[in-house]
Amino acid sequence: AQTVTQSQPEMSVQEAETVTLSCTYDTSESNYYLFWYKQPPSRQMILVIRQEAYKQQNATENRFSVNFQKAAKSFSLKISDSQLGDTAMYFCAFMRSGSQGNLIFGKGTKLSVKP
Amino acid sequence: DAGVIQSPRHEVTEMGQEVTLRCKPISGHDYLFWYRQTMMRGLELLIYFNNNVPIDDSGMPEDRFSAKMPNASFSTLKIQPSEPRDSAVYFCASSFGRIPNYGYTFGSGTRLTVV
């Protein structure tokens, strides 16, 4: 079975600085997808970024980028120029590429951006 | 599009009562997922549907839980009888395809409190 581990329950960063959230996963699959979701206090789950395992190039979305290390089964999220609106829970998630399965989430990291 | 719509946003009920949570997916989406979020267990998949047919209900905790999708625009999750340990936030999500390019679209969740 696949598992997703986020080892940092809470983190904080000063506004405008850079922060990296860690995620590791365990799978025997070779093809899969990885995601980072953001959950602000409003509870809405918002997709931040997605990475296909077969792509070597790290995904980027504006201030958000990932460091995908397939051999190490690591998928960290870097937030540059942190903004107060980035304050939220961040969840790493895994999905197999086969015909079955669904999103498997980590326990989350609570990020606080301080002014 | 108004997104995935869940109702009610909050529900407080007494132990033993029946609870029905509702979800309207995004029009055109063919997959619908029900997740439960608790502090202890994080986000867990309960059940998902494809074209209104339940595909995997292995996450449904026990027979007290049931889910239906009578048509493409509506799904319910019912708990009967409810217990205090069912207290959680229940999310509905939908997607076009099982591995959509932009992840699942989540509703804002229903916070259920069973007293």
Image: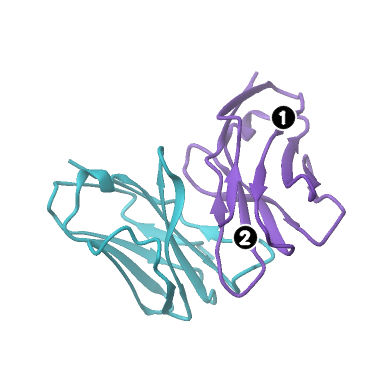
Chain colours: A purple, B cyan
Name the mark nearer the viewer: 1 or 2: 2
Name the foreground residue: B77 vs B47: B47
- Which quarter shows the N terminus of chain B? bottom right
- Position of residue B72 in the picture relative to residue B22 (left or right): right
Secondary structure beneath disc 1? loop
User: Residue at 55% across / 30% down in the picture?
Assistant: A9
Q: State the image quarter where residue B72 is shown.
A: bottom left
Residue B75 percent coordinates (x, y):
36, 70
Residue A3 percent coordinates (x, y):
58, 50
Any mark on residue A95, and which? 2
Residue B38 percent coordinates (x, y):
39, 42
User: Residue at 48% across / 81% down in the picture?
Assistant: B51
Vertical relation: B6 (above or below) B115: below
- Type of amino acid at the residue the image marks with label 1: Ser
- Type of amino acid at the residue the image marks with label 2: Met
Q: State the image quarter where residue A100 is shown.
A: bottom right
How far apart are labels 1 and 2 at the CA level? Answer: 28 Å
Name the foreground residue: A89 vs A99: A99
> Which chain's residue wears label 2?
A
Q: Earlier in the sequence, mark 1 or mark 2?
A: 1
User: Residue at 86% across / 55% down in the picture?
Assistant: A56
Residue occupied by mark 1:
A82
* Same-chain status of marks 1 and 2: yes
Number of residues whose C-alpha sits closer than 10 Å to that of mark 2, classed few (under 14), some (14–19) or many (20 or more): many
